């Protein structure tokens, strides 16, 4: 086993195996017993403690304690010392009163092991909240903050100090394997969501790690890929969300990403970690690597990547060697150690918080359900077939009607206590659904699962499973069901996760799915009964070719453990849908400008893919520049399946009375608009403000999201005055020539509406002179 471990690790990290005997011993490493010091860690004794640390001790502090490799590979979430299943811990130096702190994933909830050896009577489940993409579809920052508070509470009550979340890489292309963990194709929405999450978690006294900094938009060759991206796109699209989150929520830590940017690993980039993050944005926390990320520990130290996770023994030798040879100034090490000690000082562990191991999971489940329902997006509702009446009986089709996907795979997965299926959700709500077919579906799912080949890839347990072939429907039986039941509900599912991008075919319906949709639609429509499709997906799929065949489409996302209850709340109208898309849904995959170069090219075809992540040197050029998502589709006026910001309600909303406080911009502009519920049911509306800037020195998208708000629950006839404030920075684009943000003189149009393509109110103002804002 140890032999395999050495080989695999070497392949995975690209490091020579000679380091790994030491690595394996990591868990047994004992800090050399040194005399107990008179000084112990405290806010006032930081300088003295740093002085009292030996070089060896300092080097211990800047790396994690390693990762338990289990039987077949680096098991994410298997650090078995303090909180089993957490992703990592730091070293303790007891003689100086420095405890070890615990870091655990992730974006949809706390990821720790649910059971512990020798502790049979207790479980350690966490709440599986909806995936990030679902949370952001609520466009409700207050709700996301509440989720953050709940996750923060679970982290704290289970003895975790730092939550390795939120993740906010941009959805550049539909096939990005981890898009489900990220919020949007738009940096403002991503940044605001991340800030809300961080503010929520950290209000509990637990830290966060916003990740993966930056431009980690692929899983393909993620440990080696060089992202070639131009400075304007980097600033406006990929860094902007991080900048917002840093400035509006002060996360305790940032996780650098695996990839290189323009030839440099992000974790080795002084420009990104020191110049941009700390000097320009004022970040003063800890930067940690992603697990096993980057190569050169000395460069990482110099760049300002304080903490190396999960920590490998060879890194110590590298750093000590560099200090001894003069290649690394010990002051740099001291600087990084100081950052880490400050983090330790702020941690619940340092203040000896007595965690209960008993967070209020029932309360959090309710919140998970509310959030899941609020994140769902009603994409189609022809003839207002939804909401269903409570007396209606439903026929369910599609594997995922019986096997709901609640989240993605990998480190973003959560060990929850239970999952509410769609069937159970219907039962809880007293809605009748067909039972005969249910057992046939379950038997089919079991049979097909059993047929799956056993993967030799040690990461298989963390990777998404290929979709199961759909259960073959008998047309005669289908006709009988169509007579008997009031409507058909067809669920289409897609799983994705860490380590692998979605294959192209994943974007499209399979032949069997198309066939199933055709048969169900024909049978039910013949009886004059509606067909509703539930999209149980983590990202964008193709809908243009089949959306006309069905009456309603509900994007349920991967909604967390309360999935069935939340879906049924929407279907039955207990919750009025108020989610809106956080991505453009194109007609076809090839419509994305990124399609041409995704995922990238291999640099040397003679190097064989190896290791867990099948990594080879590769690169990708982001020649789509700033033309990501609606910035491209709307500017080109390209036909889309659904536009960015789109989503229906069971009610309707009217917009009126737009006003600006000034038609000449000085340092800010305040826009107000009245939003009224003109429908028959109480509901909430997401109000989106886009700005069209003058085309001058810099080419501008047709418009860009610059602010958004969500109304309260408005009763029919009720209205709310929504107010937005924009400052100079909100009008800018980045000039790479001048190295500044530019708001160029000219006419600006504020466009407020229901989606990026349904603008209902416009107002104009003038900027007399170009404003330059320093980065
Ligand atoms: C992931 C991170 C995660 C870390 C620790 C890495 O594989 O990329 O997002 O936080 O593992 O589990």
Image (cartoon, helix red, strand yellow):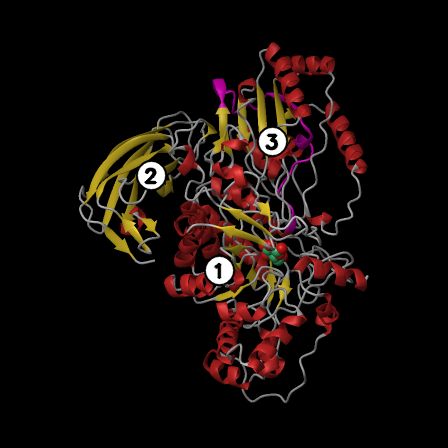
Region in magenta = 381-410
Q: Nearer the viewer, mark 2 or mark 1?
A: 2
Q: Nearer the viewer, residue 321 or 78?
A: 321
Which residue is identified by label 2? 690
Check disc 3: other Cα within 10 Å, few if <14, some if 14-19, many if 20+.
some
Label 2 element class: strand
Marks 2 and 1 in Cβ contact (< 8 Å): no
Check disc 2: other Cα within 10 Å, few if <14, some if 14-19, many if 20+.
many
Q: Nearer the viewer, residue 660 or 428?
A: 660
169, above or below 387, in the image? below
Q: At x 54% / y 83%, what residue is drawn?
A: 40
331, above or below 364, in the image? below
Query: CB at mark 1 closer than 8 A to ligand 1?
Result: no
Q: At x 44% / y 42%, what residue is drawn?
A: 139
Which residue is identified by label 1? 202
Picture coordinates of residue 164, whole percent (x, y) = 56, 57
Q: Nearer the viewer, residue 563 or 574?
A: 563
Can I make out residue 760 in this image?
yes
Picture coordinates of residue 87, whole percent (x, y) = 64, 60
Q: At x 39% / y 27%, what residue is drawn?
A: 652
Check disc 1: other Cα within 10 Å, few if <14, some if 14-19, many if 20+.
many
Mark 2 and mark 3: span between their CA atoms?
40 Å
N-term mark: 2 or 3: 3
Q: Dividing the image into 4 quarters, which one contains the N terminus?
A: bottom right
């Amino acid at each position: 086993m140890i032999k395999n471990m050495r080989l695999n690790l070497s392949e995975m990290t690209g490091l020579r195996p000679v380091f790994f005997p030491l690595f394996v011993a990591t868990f047994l490493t004992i800090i050399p017993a040194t005399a107990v010091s008179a000084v112990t860690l405290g806010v006032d004794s930081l300088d003295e403690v740093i002085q009292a640390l030996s070089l060896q001790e300092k080097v211990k502090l800047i790396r994690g304690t390693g990762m338990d490799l289990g039987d077949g590979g680096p098991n994410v979430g298997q650090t078995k010392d303090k909180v089993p299943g957490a992703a990592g811990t730091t070293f303790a130096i007891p003689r100086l009163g420095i405890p070890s702190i615990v870091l655990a994933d992730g974006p949809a909830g706390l990821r720790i092991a649910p059971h512990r050896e020798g502790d049979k009577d207790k479980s350690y489940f966490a709440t599986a909240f909806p995936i990030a993409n679902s949370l952001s579809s609520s466009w409700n920052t207050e709700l996301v903050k509440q989720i953050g508070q709940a996750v923060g509470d679970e982290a704290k009550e289970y003895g975790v100090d730092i939550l390795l979340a939120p993740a906010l890489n941009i959805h550049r292309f539909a096939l990005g394997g981890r898009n489900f963990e990220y919020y949007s194709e738009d940096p403002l929405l991503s940044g605001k969501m991340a800030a809300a999450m961080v503010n929520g978690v950290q209000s509990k006294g637990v830290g966060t790690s916003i990740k993966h900094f930056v431009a980690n938009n692929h899983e393909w060759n993620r440990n080696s890929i060089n992202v070639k991206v131009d400075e304007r796109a980097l600033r406006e699209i990929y860094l902007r969300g991080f900048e917002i989150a840093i400035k509006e929520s002060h996360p305790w830590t940032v996780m650098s990403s695996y990839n290189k940017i323009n030839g440099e690993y992000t974790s080795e980039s002084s420009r990104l970690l020191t110049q941009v993050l700390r000097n320009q944005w004022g970040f003063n926390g800890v930067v940690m690597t992603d697990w096993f990320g980057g190569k050169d520990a000395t460069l990482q130290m110099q760049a300002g990547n304080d903490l190396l996770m999960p920590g490998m023994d060879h890194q110590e030798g590298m750093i000590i060697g560099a200090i001894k040879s003069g290649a690394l100034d010990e002051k740099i090490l001291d600087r990084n150690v100081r950052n880490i000690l400050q983090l330790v000082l702020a941690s619940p562990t340092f203040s000896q918080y007595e965690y209960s191991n008993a967070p209020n999971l029932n309360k959090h489940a309710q919140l998970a359900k509310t959030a899941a329902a609020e994140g769902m997006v009603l994409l189609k509702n022809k003839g207002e077939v939804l909401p269903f009446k409570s007396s209606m009986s439903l026929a369910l089709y599609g594997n995922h009607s019986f096997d709901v996907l609640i989240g993605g795979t990998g480190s973003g997965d959560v060990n929850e206590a239970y999952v509410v299926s769609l069937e159970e959700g219907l039962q809880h709500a007293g809605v009748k659904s067909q039972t005969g077919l249910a057992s046939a579906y379950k038997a089919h799912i079991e049979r097909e699962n059993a047929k799956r080949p056993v993967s030799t890839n040690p990461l298989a347990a963390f990777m998404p499973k290929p979709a199961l072939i759909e259960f073959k429907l008998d047309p005669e039986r289908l006709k009988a069901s169509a007579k008997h039941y009031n409507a058909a509900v067809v669920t289409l599912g897609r799983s994705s996760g860490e380590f692998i991008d979605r294959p192209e075919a994943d974007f499209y319906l399979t032949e069997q799915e198309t066939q199933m949709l055709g048969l169900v639609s024909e049978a039910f429509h013949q009886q004059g009964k509606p067909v509703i499709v539930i999209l149980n997906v983590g990202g964008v799929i193709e809908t243009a070719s089949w959306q006309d065949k069905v009456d309603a489409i509900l994007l349920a996302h991967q909604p967390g453990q309360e999935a069935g209850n939340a879906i049924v709340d929407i279907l039955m109208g207990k919750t009025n849908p108020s989610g809106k898309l956080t991505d453009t849904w194109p007609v076809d995959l090839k419509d994305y400008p990124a399609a041409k170069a995704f995922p990238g090219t291999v640099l040397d075809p003679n190097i064989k893919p190896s290791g867990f992540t099948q990594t080879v040197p590769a690169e990708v050029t982001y020649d789509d520049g700033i033309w990501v998502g609606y910035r491209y589709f709307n500017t080109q006026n390209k036909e889309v399946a659904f536009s960015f910001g789109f989503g229906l309600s069971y009610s309707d909303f009217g917009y009126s009375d737009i006003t600006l406080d000034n038609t000449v911009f000085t340092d800010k502009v305040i826009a107000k608009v009245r939003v009224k519920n003109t429908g028959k049911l109480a509901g909430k509306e997401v109000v989106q403000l886009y700005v069209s800037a003058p085309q001058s020195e810099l080419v501008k998208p047709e418009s860009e999201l610059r602010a958004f708000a969500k109304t309260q629950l408005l009763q029919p006839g009720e209205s709310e005055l929504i107010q937005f404030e924009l400052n100079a920075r909100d009008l800018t684009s980045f000039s790479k020539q001048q190295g500044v943000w530019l708001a160029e003189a000219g006419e600006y149009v504020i466009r407020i509406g229901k989606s990026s393509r349904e603008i209902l109110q416009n107002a104009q103002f003038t900027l007399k002179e170009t404003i330059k804002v320093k980065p």
